[in-house]
Image (tube, rainbow, N blue to C red):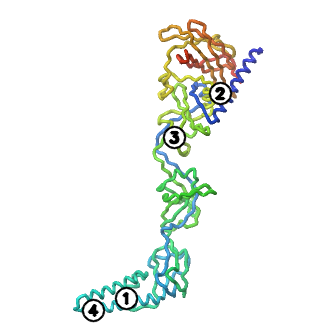
Amino acid sequence: MNHNSSQSRFRAVSLTLGLMFLAATVAYGSDSQLAPIRITPERRQLIGLKFATVMRKDVSDRLETTGSIEADERLQGYVQTRFAGWIEQVFANTTYQYVHRGQPLFTIYSPDLMSTESEYLLAIEARKRVKDSAVAGVTDDASSLVDSAAERLKLWGVSPREIARLERERTVRRAVEIDSPMSGYIVERNALPNMYVQPDTRLFTITDLSKVWIYAAVFQNEIGKVRPGDPATVSVDSYPGQNFDGRVDFIQPQIDPMTRTAKVRCEFNNPKGQLLPGMFAHVALDLPMGEQTVIPDTAVLRTGTHNVAFIDRGDGYLTPAEIELGQHVGNEFIVLKGLAPGQQIVSSANFLIDSESQLQAAAGAFVPPPPGVGANAVGPAAEAIPQASIEFSSDPNPMVRGHNKVILTLRDSKGAPITGVQVTVSFYMAAMPAMGMAAMRAQGTAVDQGNGTYSANIELPSGGTWSLTINASKQGQPIATKQIDVSASGSMAM
């Protein structure tokens, strides 16, 4: 290899490394710039390029977490008397004993209650004596006294069963039975024989476990997916293979600063009492999210400040699009802005495509595809309207690795040669990771030779397929563009 050839290769490698460094700097900087690119079928196969379709579909997620079972606070109650007295017998005498509504809990002796019961019996006797009275209003007054005394007994919490006994037996007992106001388990018991109680004394706490709450721990980055009413499924180690179905009832508006989780309260029916307070539970939340636009998560290039997807415009043209992402669901991202259903996007090798796009942007040599390329051609990719035609040839032909002369002929729409045009040529070869090759580029400015002919000397650092971009402008206005693939003989640069 002669000295000039070594220098040329050194300049080509230095240019390639410099552009790669510039691309990496832009890619991870705050002002990321991307340019459309064109990938040939051969390069597509080398880098393993794959595509996916932007879809519109019903999306649902499943969130699995842990939780603890607690009693439903709405099904708890206290047992207290509305009068002072002394407890004599206690029937419900153990904690966690199950009691039914109307079941006697204890008996109590209360002078005030005995006095009211005596008044009730006297009112009944008075009504009986005057029921045949001819005096107007006497019977009604006696009945009102009976009703008034009975109402006082009810307000004091005397059971209908005790009031019926008084009317039937017409005797006042020393101690009166107090019944349970609800069904459930006694979780707290303070009633003891011979205990003096007042209306503010809490004697029993009863909890109904026919429904329970399960507080699921959901991390703050997922709490936005959860809504009240979402289905929930729970399993506990005590009953392998058995699932219990419920729903999300409430989301506590507080994040635990230690675990960064919020408590999501789920409500479950518990008719057999299998779910017990204090149990550890495995919770699965089914989160329907409605119809959404989704793409595979592998199709997103996340630079730290931007999210980018590459749209396939057809004929190998790829256009970068900045997108706004929603929730990550399974192996897909919800897309809020930037893509439309039905578009084809790159779903693999995004980093390599991004590197090539950065190089194109850094060199400023990309030319949009001609009008009508690809079924999805939109925006800038469909606006290039050539005002002149470009004919390309080379010496030698085909081109070789090393020195080449590029010959270009520019003609207007009538076939007349165009002179006084600024013409640039740019050769680009994508990176080939499988072969250990970085992306390469060679550029030059064509010199006007007269009669619409322009030539440029180019050193190609490698044999293989190159993407050639030709830009022609006059007085600062583009008049023609051309992008073609050319082959160069010779060995590949390693």
Q: Quadrant of residue 489?
A: top right
Q: Earlier in the sequence, mark 1 or mark 4?
A: 1
For badge 3, the amino acid type reads Val
For badge 2, the amino acid type reads Ala
Residue at 53% x, 86% y: name it: 196
Residue at 49% x, 62% y: name it: 268
The residue that label 1 is drawn on is 120
For label 4, the crowd category at 10 Å Cα-Cα, with few meaning under 14, some 14 to 19 and many 20 or more, is some
Query: Can residue 334 be seen at all in this image of the molecule?
Result: yes
Circles 3, 4 touching at the beta carbon (< 8 Å)? no
Q: Secondary structure at mark 3?
A: strand
* Marking on residue 431: 2
Mark 1 and mark 2: span between their CA atoms?
Answer: 102 Å
Mark 3 and mark 2: span between their CA atoms?
Answer: 30 Å
The residue that label 4 is drawn on is 130
From the top left corner, tell me how far across and down residue 29 is, in percent: 64, 35
Mark 4 and mark 2: span between their CA atoms?
Answer: 114 Å
For badge 4, the amino acid type reads Val
Q: Earlier in the sequence, mark 3 or mark 2?
A: 3
* Marking on residue 335: 3
Q: Secondary structure at mark 4?
A: loop
From the top left corner, tell me how far across and down residue 56 is, in percent: 47, 40
Query: Can residue 465 be seen at all in this image of the molecule?
Result: no
For label 2, the crowd category at 10 Å Cα-Cα, with few meaning under 14, some 14 to 19 and many 20 or more, is some
Query: Which corner quadrant holds the N terminus?
Result: top right
Residue 303 against residue 197 in the figure, above or below:
above
Mark 3 and mark 1: span between their CA atoms?
Answer: 76 Å
Which is in the foreground here, disc 3 or disc 2? 3
Q: Earlier in the sequence, mark 3 or mark 4?
A: 4
